[in-house]
Structures are given as structure tokens and as C-alpha cells.
Amino acid sequence: MHIGVAVALIVIVIGAFAAVLPTSNGQASSALTKIFNPGSDTKTSQGNNTALIAAQAATATAVTQDGFDAGNQVYAGVQAAPTVTTNIIPAQDQGSLNRFFYGQCTYWANMRYHQLTGHWVPWLGNAYEWAYQASSYGWKTSSVPNPYGPSIIVLAPYTEGAGAYGHVAVVETGVSNPYNGVSTSNWNWNGNWATTTYWTFYPGSGVTFIWFPG
């Protein structure tokens, strides 16, 4: 008798759930499945999260290759530019600073050259593209650095340790005798993302120096 009463109660409870849950497109069946098997959706969610994290990691690896510049973009898992205030950088200049991809050699070269000269780089593009972009915008290009002021060094792909996208840096010292090497300040050289490091490069094949005319 007790067994019969228990079975009857179970049938009533199941019937009540079926009455109140939606029945279109199998939603009732799905809802009951979730009730009696609450872990059924967890595996799918974990799988989706794993795939998303893997995709974000792959994107971060691709876009942080030295010399690659996607412009002013933000990617999951990649350090974004810090918030700047107008008392540090004038409002009219903030867009010029952030036109390049934060953390890249291109961002540093633009920022550092402006610190030294007051001029922003007016074009966009990967590092190696700066050599011909400069001449298109009326900047000086040369096989040796500017003897009268700061310049940017542009390395063609695979030149002096650069990767497939080339590399740009700002010449700091060594202008008086460049063939003995010029010391440069860099970002993203040897994987130092958004970190200033110093490296010596030499004039030669695949190396161009650019600077604002005047």
C-alpha cells in the first residue's frame, strides 16, 4: 500500500511539472532533463569556454608578433593602452598617439619620436611599410640616420633579427659614426611587449632611416 501511494505521488509531481512547463519545440522535455540531470548543460558550457579561451590565445599570439600593426584595436588577452588624461597629453594629440596598436614597436616609435621632435607619424601600417610610407608623406629617407636630429630606423622583414613584419625603433645615439652601430629604443623587440629596451642596429641592406623634413 505504501509503495502504491509513493508511486502515485511521483506521477502527480511529474504531471504538475509537465503542465506548467512550456511544451513548444521540446522545451518541456529539455526543462525536465535539466531538472533531473542538472549537469547536462555544464559540459557544453565548459567546452565552449575552452574553445573561446583557445581562440583568444591564438589571436593574442598572432597580433603581438613584432612589427604587426592592426591600428587602434583592443584584443582579449592583450594589454590595452592606459587611460590618458588631457593634463598629460593634449586632447588634440590623443588620437595621434593611439592610432597605432598599443604595445607594438610602431606605437613606441610614434610616441617616442613625438617626444623628441613634436611630430607624429601620419601614416598607418606594419613596421616594414614605414620605409615607403615615409617618402609618400614627404618625410626624408636615407641609408644613414639624420645627422641633425632624431630619426626612426625601419628594418625590412628578417633584417638584423626582425620578424616577418619588420621592425621600427627610434635612434637614440651613435649618429656621428653610424657604421659602428646606432643605439635605439624599442618596444616589442625580442618579445618585450610594451616594454622599453635598447638595441644596437647597423646601416646596411634592408635598413632605412626616416625623419620629418626640416
Image (cartoon, rainbow, N blue to C red):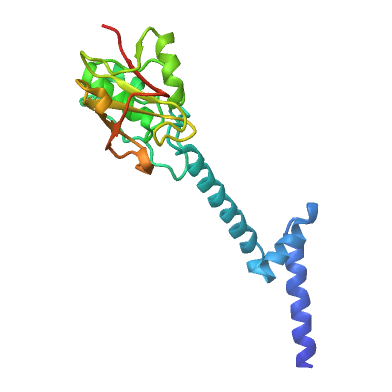
Determine the image quadrant of residue 119. Answer: top left
Residue 26 location in percent, x, y?
79, 56
Relative to residue 58, is residue 209 drawn left or right? left
**Quadrant of the rendered image containing residue 134:** top left
User: Can residue 32 be seen in the rendering of this structure?
Assistant: yes
Q: Which residue is nearer to you in this view: 142 or 151?
A: 142
Q: Is residue 164 left or right of residue 99?
A: right
List the single residue furthest toward the bottom: 1
Query: Residue 170, located in which quarter of the rendered image?
Result: top left
Q: Residue 113: x, y in percent? A: 27, 22
- Residue 63 lies left or right of residue 139; in this view the side is right
Rendered-image quadrant of the C terminus: top left
Residue 130 point in image, percent of width and height = 42, 20
Q: Quadrant of the N terminus?
A: bottom right
| Left or right, 88 with reference to 68 | left
Identify the residue shown where x is 74% and y is 85%: 6
Q: What residue sits 31% from the left and 33% below the top? A: 186
| 65 vs 86, nearest the viewer | 65
Q: Answer whether residue 94 is visible to the viewer in this image.
A: no
Image: 195 above or below 90: below
Query: Number of labelled discs?
Result: 0
Provide residue 88's location: percent of width, then percent of height.
Answer: 21, 26
